[in-house]
Amino acid sequence: METASAPHLLRSCVAVMIDLDGTMVDTLGDFAKAIDGMLDDLKLPALDARHIEHMVGKGSEHLLHSVLTHVLTEAGEPQVSATVARLMPEAWERYQWHYERVNGQFSTLYPGVAEGVAALAKAGYPLACLTNKPTAFAHELLKAKGLHGYFGHVFGGDAFERKKPDPMPLVKTCEALGTAPAKTLMVGDSSNDAQAARGAGCPVVLVTYGYNHGEPIRAVNADAFVDSLMELTAR
């Protein structure tokens, strides 16, 4: 599916949007800690951390809904949907409480991210972080990992009326950047990012190490793939 090299795509663009979880930062440890705390508060069984990776990427509400559905199904709850709906408000409040306290503590930058983002900024590309993570958490995580200063804009899943894979967040981010979608590169780790980019008319590069809901990343319709963000500016 690759139709161009990542550096070639970058040279045809004037700005770059970059996803956060699974693209710049491996945040599964933070998610696991916050979810453990939330489930304990709700007196529900713990969730094996290996399941979380497949649930990440469509926003915190989707993550919590998936976690509750899985845990309740495994526990033999007869009315899973109704029970999830009943528990969601408290689950959301407790998850937010725990996540705020662990944000960045159990997560790590992927190799090449710091260097790659610095190289993009040095080359003069305006950068925006575009994630489905709540905006406040995204700001704090970028600060914790030393990346915040590179981004002129940070938009989370609560910044717009719809989240990725809807194209709206990309279109709105391009408006904030003052750039045409066709000249604004989207860099992400999943089919959500690619689908949103296609809908918005943006070129898209996917990293090969992210989450992508447990599906093979190279099966996704993207313009190019990279093993490190440093490859974007390689000559």
Image (cartoon, rainbow, N blue to C red):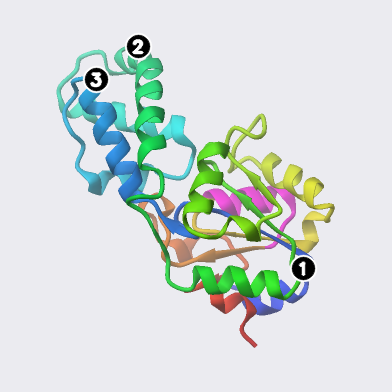
164 drawn magenta: no
Q: Is residue 124 above or below residue 139?
A: below
Residue that label 2 marks: 86
Q: In this view, does 44 lie above or below 59?
A: above
The residue that appears at 24% across and 27% down in the rendered structure is 39
What secondary structure is the stretch in magenta mostly built from?
Answer: helix
Secondary structure under badge 1?
loop
The residue that appears at 31% across and 49% down in the rendered structure is 29
Amino acid type shown at disc 1: Cys
Q: In the rendered structure, are the residues bearing label 1 and label 2 in contact, judged by CB atoms less than 8 Å apart?
A: no
Q: In the rendered structure, are the residues bearing label 3 and label 2 in contact, judged by CB atoms less than 8 Å apart?
A: no
The region drawn magenta spans 192-203
Q: In this view, does 56 lie above or below 112?
A: above
The residue that appears at 59% across and 68% down in the rendered structure is 117
Residue that label 1 marks: 13
Secondary structure under badge 2?
helix
Question: Relative to 184, is 100 on the left or the right?
Answer: left
The residue that appears at 78% across and 55% down in the rendered structure is 181
- Residue 32 image point, x, y percent: 29, 42
Tell me if mark 1 has few (under 14), some (14-19) or many (20+) residues whose alpha carbon lies within 10 angstroms of its own: some
- Residue 3 image point, x, y percent: 64, 74
Amino acid type shown at disc 2: Arg
Residue that label 3 marks: 42
Q: Real-space Cα distance between discs 3 and 1? A: 47 Å
Question: Relative to 46, is 102 on the left or the right?
Answer: right
Tell me if mark 2 has few (under 14), some (14-19) or many (20+) residues whose alpha carbon lies within 10 angstroms of its own: few
Q: Is residue 23 among what the camera can see?
A: no
Q: Is residue 39 among what the camera can see?
A: yes
